[in-house]
Image (cartoon, rainbow, N blue to C red):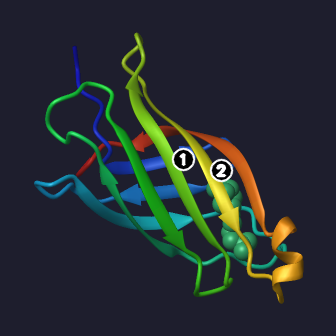
């Protein structure tokens, strides 16, 4: 059974792109995220991400989580949690659920500040490929 590798270039169903670097020994990783959609409809910029994979070397379908800092164009933040799978065809898939926290002006607006959704990523290019 082939293990799912997080590092490399990925694309989701919204056409956003994400590149994840090589993982450190303790499962940490960094990368870059280019979203195709934005809350304000403005021009997105490449944004840094940081995360961690669980049980880095042991499992075939590891779980992971990462945070994207959109701060170059937005004061919102997003966390993704998901799992990496290798399909029977050999295609790798990241199934994720995200929380998008928008900055609101006051605690009275807190109730509307968080969105939740799902993204499926498929591999666009292998690490180093
Ligand atoms: C913003 O517009 O203020 C930040 C960008 C948010 C993009 C969201 S994060 C969840 C979803 N998945 C994507 O690839 N893009 C959107």
**Horizontal and vertical percent position of residue 84:** 40, 33
Relative to 105, residue 37 above or below = above
Residue 2 in the figure: left or right of residue 8: left
Q: Which mark is residue 86?
A: none
- Residue under the image location 42 percent in, 24 percent down: 91
Report helix, strand or loop for mark 1. Answer: strand
Residues tagged 1 and 2 counted as in contact (Cβ below 8 A):
yes
User: Image quadrant of residue 124?
Assistant: top left
User: Image quadrant of residue 101?
Assistant: bottom right
Report helix, strand or loop for mark 2. Answer: loop
| Residue furthest to the left | 25
Q: Depth check: give the residue in front, 52 or 37.
A: 52
Relative to 41, residue 116 above or below = above
Residue 54 in the figure: left or right of residue 74: left
| Residue furthest to the top | 88
Q: Depth check: give the residue in front, 81 or 17.
A: 81
User: Image quadrant of residue 100?
Assistant: bottom right
| Residue furthest to the front | 108
Neighbours of disc 1 within 10 Å: few (<14), some (14-19), many (20+) = many
- Residue under the image location 83 percent in, 89 percent down: 105
Quarter of the image with the N terminus is top left
**Horizontal and vertical percent position of residue 71:** 58, 85
Q: Which mark is residue 15?
A: 2
Number of numbered discs present?
Answer: 2
Residue 76 in the figure: left or right of residue 34: right
Q: Quadrant of ligand 1?
A: bottom right
Q: Which mark is residue 11?
A: 1
**Horizontal and vertical percent position of residue 55:** 21, 39
Residue 92 in the figure: left or right of residue 102: left
**Horizontal and vertical percent position of residue 89:** 41, 13
């Amino acid at each position: 059974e082939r293990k799912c590798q997080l590092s490399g270039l990925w694309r989701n169903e919204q056409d956003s792109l994400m590149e994840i670097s090589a993982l450190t020994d303790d499962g940490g990783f960094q990368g870059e995220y280019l979203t195709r959609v934005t809350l304000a409809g403005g021009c997105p910029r490449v944004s840094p991400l940081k995360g961690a994979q669980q049980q880095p070397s042991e499992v075939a379908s590891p779980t992971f989580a990462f945070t994207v800092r959109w701060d170059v164009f937005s004061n919102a933040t997003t966390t993704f949690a998901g799992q990496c799978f290798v399909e029977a065809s050999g295609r790798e898939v990241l199934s994720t659920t995200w929380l998008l926290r928008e900055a609101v002006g006051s605690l009275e607006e807190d109730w509307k500040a968080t969105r939740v959704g799902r993204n499926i990523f498929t591999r666009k290019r292998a690490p180093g490929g």
